Image (cartoon, helix red, strand yellow):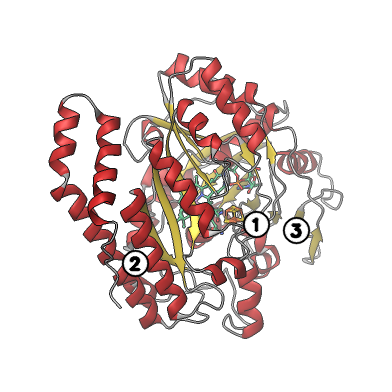
Amino acid sequence: MKIALIQPAKPDDKSSAAKDWNLCRPLSLLYLSCAIRNSPLHECQIFDLEQIFAVTSDFCVEKMIMSLNFDVFGVTATTFTRHEAISVIKLIRKYHPSKKIIVGGVHFMHCDVDTLINVPEVDVVVLGEGEKTIVDLLDALHASLPLENIKGITYRNDSGEIIENLDSELFEDLDHMDIFSPSIPMDYPEYLMGSKQLIPAVSLMTSRGCPFKCVFCAKAGMKYRHRSSQNVIKELKYYVNQLGITAFNFIDLTFTANPQRSRELCQAIIDEGLKIQWWCETRANVPLDMICLMQQAGCRYIVVGVETGSRSVLERIQKGVTLEQVEQLFVHTKKHGIQTTAYFMCSHLGETYEDAMETIRFIDKIERMYGVSTTLQPCMILPGTEIEAIAKKSGALSASFSWSGEFHAPENSKLGQVTTIPLFLDGLTLEQISDILFKKNKISAIHHRYKDISLGYFKVALEAHGLIKLSKIVLDDLYTFFFKNRHFVDK
Ligand code: B12
Ligand code: SF4
């Protein structure tokens, strides 16, 4: 069977959130294609419309879909690209009426029945990780067998009924998939630019799943599994030695979820003498002694989901970390010269205006004391999350709401957010959210300006002498020294 795997282009959305998305290798499709290529019966080709067209363009996408010649089409999406994915699906059905359309990914897997009811062009939704399921599906389609024995799918049978075959198996053998093999070329130089520093960097995944259960997260509670350190080293060496790439973005949900294995991996990078730089996302409860090891292994930047500066909200959203742990982490990252960004949200479950102000004060503190950069976004409802269930129960999401239908909230754009995802409005009004975002932007702008202008000449002087890392540490220390008692939060 010949299958086309398609990632839709970005929505043509003017919000600052959408503009900031980097181009990144479509790892989901790369993993699927690797599994498919291991089977002699099937062939596959990836079409990353985000890479080809950047933002979606109806005319070009239509022309391209029309020209494809495949037996099966597989389409991935996040909730943010679902409308673009559905447009692609409708075009596939228009030009290839008898071909099977399979969808998967973090969006469709959480609203399978909704998708099959409201997007009749879709034949099968894959519910979890797709490597095994996609091959089982292609084998069954190849042999014209019924789909009833394939686990982890929801599908429409011949009489049009929707059948749910739950119990998908998680993919355990993460070492088995060498997506970096030369048979899968890195065709697009743009993928190398997915780094903040705009140096050639590659995104790669060393583990899957996350044992935690934050109420807003679409990946909450998915079993954690990791690749062996040797297997990751093999991939790193391939990029370093064959392609000359020395910067990496580890896109694991929580890079340090299993501290023992993170230590092992860092130690292996050091022992192998790999001169690389990397960054990762993680939670605030990183064992502090590990920060130094991470730095020695090349970690230059960590993104931390802090979410809120309010203790009560932190408990309610089941983040499982404390503000003390957050601060301790930033004390240590600063000490070791690792740059940090902390992600925050407002309009959390049961959040009051005072809770949100605690977040603003916490942001002020960590920017001032530890040189952390921060982002703050209102909480959005995503399918499969606990807050989706809460919003449905409370009526905030109406009973007739469909993730496949048109949804347009123009008020989101005033908050810099995409207009196609509902905001979670629990304790805060839109005006209060706007006020909180304004305060946050003002504080960050002040810190930025003071740091860059007032203290900038120290930086320039040190950097002129080649003391780049020192300049960052000295600058942050001076800033903290001068401003530690100065609070920039309006009452
Ligand atoms: C890399 C990444 C990005 C990159 C690239 C995104 C992209 N277009 O690929 C960048 C930096 C641009 C980005 C931006 C954003 N991201 Co992001 N990102 C990720 C990240 C870290 C990795 C995605 C990945 O490659 N996973 C690896 C693959 C192997 O896993 P997978 O995608 O689940 O795929 C498996 C299955 O789902 C299934 N499958 C997937 N597709 C298909 C298709 C078929 C046909 C089949 C059969 C199976 C199948 O099989 C795959 C293999 O097992 C994830 C978190 C994570 N670790 O997964 C968040 C994540 C996808 N991002 C998220 C969010 C919220 C965002 C932003 C909105 C952030 C923001 N506020 O601006 C934007 C939205 C961008 C967009 N285009 O939608 C959410 C999405 C939630 C949702 N319901 O949509 C996630 C899940 C993070 C989270 N914990 O909530 N992101
Ligand atoms: S720790 Fe991160 S990945 Fe894990 S459930 Fe919470 S938000 Fe999601």
Q: Earlier in the sequence, mark 3 or mark 1?
A: 3
Q: Are the two marked residues, 3 and 1, in contact with CB atoms closer than 8 angstroms?
A: no
User: Which of the marked residues, 3 or 2, is nearer the chain's N terminus?
Assistant: 3
- Of 347 and 259, nearer the camera is 259
Q: Nearer the viewer, mark 3 or mark 1?
A: 1
Between disc 3 and disc 2, the foreground one is: 2
Q: Amino acid at mark 3?
A: Thr
Circle 1: is it few (<14), some (14-19), or many (20+) Cα within 10 Å? Answer: some
Q: Does the numbered disc 1 mark a residue whose Cβ is under 8 Å from ligand 2?
A: yes
The answer to whether marks 2 and 1 mark residues whose Cβ atoms lie closer than 8 Å is no
Q: Nearer the viewer, residue 374 or 70?
A: 374
Label at residue 154 = 3
Numbered mark located on residue 231 in the image: none
Kindly state the secondary structure of the residue where label 1 is placed: loop
Q: Residue beneath label 2, please?
A: 416
N-terminal of the pair, mark 2 or mark 1, is 1
